[in-house]
């Protein structure tokens, strides 16, 4: 309470607490009397207001000492036209104001929502739609506010549009109501002094000051239960039904343009702009939004014009803004719910209605709130999600299309009300249901970009950091999707292109588009410190560089082909991007799966580049020694990033890769040793390296169950390496030692032949039934032609080694006597050699039979070696 301390004018005020009023000077009333009066009134009402669902009016005429209680429900039923009843309007206003006051209470308990809803519904029942559109529109809006939508959380200090405008949503002065006297009692055509119509009467106001004059034992249990909505769609549909009724009331109250009065020439026409310094929102926010809407395709371009003729600032204008915003929120929640159910066509239809509502709101609004801009950013983000899901689920396009075009009568009527104000075309591009994948991905990206652009207005991104991060994540993701799309298209063009032809302009254009998308996506993820996703996009950029390298492979004759500089350039670029990806991740602990994947791709790139340099050596540009050095370095780097020890699904691949690298390096050093003349130190170094890598390759291939041919090839090359070394040896002792080592290598090939034998047995052991029997030469996993080629070489080399061993042992025996070990070896070797000759002479033997013979002979050779070793011991 404020108390004026000076007689003339409101010069000074003093704040007084309500409970201190009785203690003020010249305060002549008793608080006990006030309490007794209040208790008596309440007891009187409880005793007499006993009919459930009825509306009562406690009435005291001006200047009268009598208080009367009327049952308005009963009196209204007696009147033929309820709108002619003198009690209708005052009661409706009372119900409305009580509901409004309850809604305005901060931290309003939801348990009162049922009461508020009952008050508002009863208020609407009493009002004539044609006479009181303002109250009806406001009541319907409040009803829609009772149903909580799953909207973005608001700050505790912020007030909803209802709290900002509820005092303006209804004003008694604008409604045509019965006149009231200065005490607030309505004069009516019927005389309230008619005691026969009163339910109960207090004969004198003085009776109310007597303590416990009136007592009540009757309990009133009004039925004010709030309806239970079983799901989100039901709740949103209730909200939209109230919004539609509110919109109808507003639209019906707007005069047609032909009924508007002519302009007064002496009255200046108000301009459609305000001084930015007087606006409630951030400076320049409306101007930013106008430019944004213009770019998005809105026809309004920020003119804040209403096609229906609504006057800015009028109650219709304010109320329609609130109702339109509410409809946009409801449609957004419906779209999000449909998205969760994977009903993407339905989700797109709802988000289209949400954006149409918001576009109309932007058309009408003269003071844009940052909260409303945040809603638009969220709508566009969801729209981008839907378009991406539609692009990824093209198989159900017909069902999505059918859901998209379906529309309820309620939605049509709301849209009709929106079209009274604007064309609703501002975001039409965002909600097109295209059948083209590229177009859908592009629209999704544009939605995210628009959502991000809105967050730059008035520093919304710092006020909503979580939403900002989500938008940037989605932008990075969609740019990755588009980048991969263009990259795959370029790869498809490359596969269709004839090898001899050069790179087409279309391929190069697709590379540029893909690279641009990856680059922007990487920037998005790096700006929010999302190292994992940034690494994945860097990895995809590396893959793009490898595709570019493959496209630049040498044209022309395959035998004349050389590893080109362009290939080297793009492979090195790919390596740079993979290394950046590893630096982005930092350590394996951040995301082990991504870390391992990047390492594998980096190893593959080094391996591919080294293999191409080795197979298509650029001898026209570089010396042989330089090429060998570069191949060796690339192979060793490939090994560095190839994890053969960690247990994972990729471990066998890593082991195979590592074995292949060692095999290739060993072959390269073996070749160098064959072709090199002169530098003995270098020859010795190459000999050691070849032996080392052959040994490692054999060890790794031995671990694999599906690479018997590779293991056999490595061992045969090791034997050839031993044979080459033997040619430079002069002494029989040295040659015998080398031969013994070569035969030991031959014995170790038994594992490879056993694997081949097992596969062949399984193949021939399959049950045969009629025509479904497998062909004799069919094997899904074994290359029979390669096996036969390797087997022939093996038989030839084993025969050669055994013969050389027999010759050397025989000549040695003549010179030295009593050498039991050599005699045993010689005898074994002769026996095996004779069996081998008979086996190779049999031209009708099947592959399996030949393999069986070899396995048997190797077993004998191994047993002979073991026996000779034990004899020595």
Image (cartoon, rainbow, N blue to C red):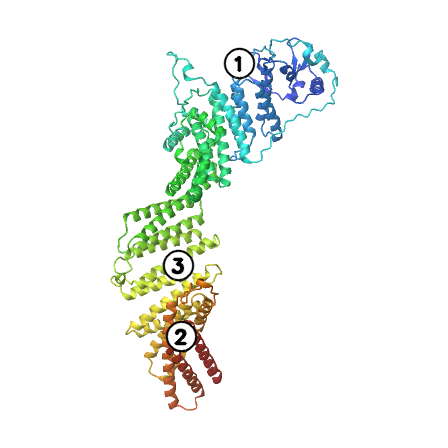
Between disc 2 and disc 3, whose residue precedes? 3
Image position, residue 852 (x, y; %): 44, 74
Q: The N terminus is located in which quarter?
A: top right
Name the residue carrying label 2: 845
Q: Which callout, 3 or 1, points to the residue nearer the camera?
A: 1
Query: Based on the displayed image, in which of its 4 quarters is residue 644 positioned?
Result: bottom left
Q: Nearer the viewer, residue 217 or 752?
A: 752
Label 2 crowding class (10 Å Cα cut-off): few <14, some 14-19, many 20+? few
| Residue 311 sits above or below residue 180 on the image | below
Q: Find the residue positioned furthest to the front.
A: 770
Q: Is residue 524 visible?
A: no
| Residue 344 sits above or below residue 799 on the image | above
Q: Which callout, 2 or 1, points to the residue nearer the camera?
A: 2
In space, the residues marked 3 and 1 are separated at their CA atoms by 84 Å
Query: Given contact means CB atoms under 8 Å apart, are the residues at marks 2 and 1 in contact?
Result: no
Image position, residue 504 (x, y; %): 28, 49
Query: Given contact means CB atoms under 8 Å apart, are the residues at marks 2 and 3 in contact?
Result: no
Element under disc 3: helix
Q: Is residue 500 left or right of residue 848?
A: left
Q: Which mark is residue 603?
A: 3
Q: Nearer the viewer, residue 859 or 19?
A: 859
Residue at point 44%, 46% (across, down): 529
In space, the residues marked 2 and 3 are separated at their CA atoms by 44 Å
Q: Is residue 119 left or right of residue 250?
A: right
Q: Which mark is residue 176?
A: 1
Q: Which mark is residue 615?
A: none
Image position, residue 837 (x, y; %): 38, 80
| Residue 657 sits above or below residue 505 on the image | below
Label 3 crowding class (10 Å Cα cut-off): few <14, some 14-19, many 20+? many
Query: Based on the displayed image, in which of its 4 quarters is residue 2 positioned?
Result: top right
Residue at point 26%, 53% (across, down): 502
Query: Based on the displayed image, in which of its 4 quarters is residue 187 positioned?
Result: top right
């Amino acid at each position: 309470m404020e108390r004026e301390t000076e007689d003339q004018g409101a010069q000074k005020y003093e704040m007084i607490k309500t409970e201190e009023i009785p203690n003020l000077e010249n305060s002549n009333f008793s608080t006990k009397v006030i309490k007794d009066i209040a208790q008596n009134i309440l007891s009187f009402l409880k005793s007499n207001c006993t009919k459930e669902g009825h509306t009562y009016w406690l009435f005291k005429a001006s200047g009268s000492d009598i208080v009367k209680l009327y049952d308005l429900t009963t009196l209204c039923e007696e009147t033929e036209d309820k709108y002619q009843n003198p009690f209708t309007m005052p009661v409706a206003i009372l119900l409305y104001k009580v509901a409004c006051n309850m809604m305005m209470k901060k931290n309003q308990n939801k348990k009162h929502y049922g009461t508020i809803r009952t008050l508002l519904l009863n208020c609407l029942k009493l009002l004539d739609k044609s006479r009181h559109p303002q109250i009806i529109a406001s009541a319907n809006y409040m009803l829609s506010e009772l149903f909580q939508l799953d909207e973005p959380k608001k700050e505790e200090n912020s007030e909803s549009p209802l709290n900002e405008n509820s005092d303006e949503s209804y004003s008694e002065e604008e409604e045509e109501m019965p006149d009231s006297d200065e005490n607030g009692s309505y004069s009516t055509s019927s005389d309230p002094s008619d005691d026969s119509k009163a339910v109960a009467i207090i004969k004198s106001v003085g009776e109310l000051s007597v303590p416990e004059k009136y007592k009540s034992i009757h309990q009133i249990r009004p039925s004010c239960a709030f309806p239970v909505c079983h799901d989100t769609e039901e709740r949103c549909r209730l909200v939209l039904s109230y919004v539609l009724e509110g919109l109808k009331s507003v639209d019906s109250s707007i005069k047609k343009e032909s009924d508007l009065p002519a302009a007064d020439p002496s009255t200046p026409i108000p301009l459609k702009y305000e001084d930015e310094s007087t606006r409630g929102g951030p400076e320049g926010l409306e101007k930013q939004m106008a430019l944004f809407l213009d770019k998005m395709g809105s026809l309004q371009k920020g003119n804040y014009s209403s096609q229906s003729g609504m006057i800015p600032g009028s109650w219709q204008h304010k109320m329609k803004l609130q109702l339109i915003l509410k409809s946009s929120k409801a449609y957004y929640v419906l779209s999000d719910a449909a998205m969760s159910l994977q009903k993407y066509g339905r989700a797109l239809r709802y988000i289209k209605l949400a954006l149409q509502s918001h576009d109309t709101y932007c058309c009408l609004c003269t003071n844009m709130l940052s909260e409303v801009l945040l809603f638009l950013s969220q709508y566009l983000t969801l729209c981008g999600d839907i378009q991406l899901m539609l692009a990824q689920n093209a198989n159900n396009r017909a069902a999505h299309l059918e859901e998209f075009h379906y529309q309820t009568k309620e939605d049509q009527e709301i849209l009709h009300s929106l079209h009274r104000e604007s064309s609703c075309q501002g975001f039409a591009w965002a909600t097109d249901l295209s059948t083209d994948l590229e177009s859908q991905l592009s629209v999704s990206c544009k939605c995210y970009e628009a959502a991000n652009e809105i967050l730059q207005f008035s520093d919304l991104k710092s006020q909503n950091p979580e939403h900002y991060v989500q938008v940037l994540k989605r932008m990075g993701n969609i740019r990755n999707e588009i980048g991969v799309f263009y990259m795959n298209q370029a790869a498809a063009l490359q596969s269709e292109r004839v090898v001899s032809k050069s790179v087409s302009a279309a391929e190069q254009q697709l590379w540029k588009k893909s690279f641009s998308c990856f680059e922007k996506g990487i920037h998005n993820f790096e700006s929010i410190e999302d190292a994992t996703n940034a690494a994945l996009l860097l990895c995809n950029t590396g893959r793009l560089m490898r595709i570019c390298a493959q496209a630049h492979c040498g044209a022309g004759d395959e035998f004349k082909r050389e590893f080109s500089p362009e290939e080297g350039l793009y492979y090195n670029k790919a390596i740079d991007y993979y290394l950046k990806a590893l630096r982005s991740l930092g350590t394996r602990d951040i995301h082990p799966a991504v870390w391992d994947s990047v390492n594998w791709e980096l190893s593959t790139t080094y391996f591919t580049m080294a293999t191409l340099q080795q197979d298509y050596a650029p001898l026209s540009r570089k010396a042989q020694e330089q090429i060998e050095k570069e191949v060796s370095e690339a192979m060793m780097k490939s090994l560095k990033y190839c994890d053969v020890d960690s247990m994972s699904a990729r471990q066998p691949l890593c082991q195979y890769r590592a074995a292949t690298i060692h095999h290739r390096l060993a072959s390269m050093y073996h070749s160098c040793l064959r072709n090199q003349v002169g530098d003995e130190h270098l020859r010795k170094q190459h000999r050691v390296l070849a032996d080392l890598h052959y040994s490692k390759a054999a060890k790794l291939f031995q671990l694999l169950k599906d690479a018997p041919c590779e293991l056999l090839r490595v061992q045969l090359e090791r034997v050839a390496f031993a044979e080459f070394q033997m040619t430079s040896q002069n002494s029989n002792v040295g040659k015998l030692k080398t031969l013994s080592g070569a035969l030991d290598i031959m014995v170790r090939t038994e594992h490879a032949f056993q694997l081949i034998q097992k596969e062949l047995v399984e193949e021939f052991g399959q049950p045969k039934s009629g025509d479904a029997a497998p062909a004799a030469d069919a094997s899904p996993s074994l290359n029979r032609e390669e096996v036969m080629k390797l087997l022939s070489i093996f038989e030839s080399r084993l025969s050669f080694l055994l013969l050389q061993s027999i010759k050397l042992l025989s000549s040695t025996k003549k010179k030295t006597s009593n050498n039991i070990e050599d005699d045993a070896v010689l005898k074994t070797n002769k026996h095996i050699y004779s069996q081998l000759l008979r086996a190779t002479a049999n031209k009708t033997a099947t592959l399996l039979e030949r393999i069986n013979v070899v396995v048997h002979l190797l077993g004998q050779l191994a047993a002979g070696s073991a026996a000779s070793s034990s004899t020595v011991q």
